[in-house]
Amino acid sequence: MKYRLILAAVLALILAVYFVPGVIISGAVSSSSPPPFACSLEIPLDKSQTSNVLVAGQTWERARVNIQNIGSEPLHNITVLIEIPQDLEIDIPSQPYHITKEEQNLEAEIGDLSPGQSIDLFLDAKPPASIEFKKEVPFKIHVVYPGGEQQSEQFINIVPPPSWLTYFTILASLLLFAGILVAVKHFGVLELFSTVDLITIALLAAIIAVVFRYISKLINLGWFDGLIIAIPTVILMIVALQLVRKPGTATLLFACVLLISIVVWGSQIMWLGFYLAEGVIVDLLVFLFGMDYADRRLTAAVYGISRGMVSTLVFYMLYAPVEWKISYAPWYVGVQLALACAGGLIGGLLGYDTAVKMSGARL
């Protein structure tokens, strides 16, 4: 009897050692099993802007929260809780799901999700008017379903608006304009322009500022808008160079474009530097090429490409962030730079042919 008890105890111990780890391991696998949901936040939705970055003082930006059932079984009665950072103002647009808002917390009842099925929840976020330093804030997404829950976080950056750049841009534009006026007066550049020259420049500037801009507002071509506008703008710039043939022609042309835009469209004077940069780079190249007023196809193409390159970089790297408070993605700036250069090349070649026919010039 005694040995039977000892044998039974040893057998029980062996069985315990054999089965209990299996139970423990089974429980560990269950607890470490992959989560049933894939949660993601996309803000802003505009692909041209830097992902997960909002600029203080910016207007409303649309955000999308995606919830996907990545498991192998359907899940029912799903509720999504979203905790919004205190720095953001939130609004709920119309959508097919019932969403309630209480302070900075959102609760959405999305019902059932089959394996592989996903849903999108949309919300509008507005950053604060101003912040002193860059801040990283979390969006907390909590998914609750019968039998479990899942929580995830995604961080976004709120960056201060480049307010100091605003004053710098205005000051630099005014200084550049003042410098040009001093140079014009000192060297008597305006005296070189005849009445016909000034009328020609004014008419071409009016076409660029009024007609082309109206067309761009009427027909939105998205990413290719800059390309389509660059081609006729460069054509008229090359025409102006060949017809007028005076130092400072391009600068005067784009200065007139700004003045007309201020009157017709209400453009701000802070854009003066942007318009002057387009003309100054071309007039500088005219001087470097030995006063070649796009008399060759090569120089016409170089002028068009240079104008497109400078205007795009100045616009997307300085003026657009300052004026519109948008942080553009580097790849988008690169795409627009390539399109502007392509438009400058095409416009330069077409402008050369057009100018030759208009002026009767020959190679």
Image: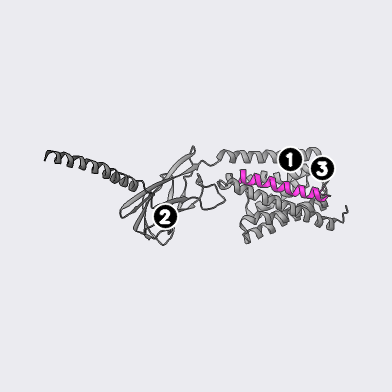
**Quadrant of res 173:** top right
- Residue 211 in the image, given as x and y percentages of width and height: 69, 59
Q: Earlier in the sequence, mark 1 or mark 3?
A: 1
Q: Earlier in the sequence, mark 1 or mark 2?
A: 2
Q: Quadrant of the N terminus?
A: top left
Between disc 1 and disc 2, the foreground one is 2
- Residue 299 in the image, given as x and y percentages of width and height: 80, 47
Between 211 and 291, the one lying in front of the other is: 291
Type of amino acid under label 3: Phe
Dot 3 lies on which element? Answer: loop
- Residue 50 in the image, given as x and y percentages of width and height: 54, 47
Identify the residue shown where x is 26% and y is 41%. Answer: 17
Q: Residues within 10 Å of mark 3 (few under 14, many from 20)?
A: few
Residue assigned mark 3: 289
- Classified by dominant secondary structure, the portion drawn in magenta counts as helix
Q: Is residue 296 magenta?
A: yes
The residues tagged by marks 3 and 2 sit, at their Cα atoms, a distance apart of 63 Å
The residues tagged by marks 1 and 2 sit, at their Cα atoms, a distance apart of 63 Å
Q: Is residue 353 left or right of residue 48?
A: right
The residues tagged by marks 1 and 3 sit, at their Cα atoms, a distance apart of 21 Å
- Residue 225 in the image, given as x and y percentages of width and height: 64, 56
Residue assigned mark 2: 70
The range drawn in magenta is 293-319
Residue assigned mark 1: 180
Residue 337 image label = none
Q: Residues within 10 Å of mark 2 (few under 14, many from 20)?
A: some
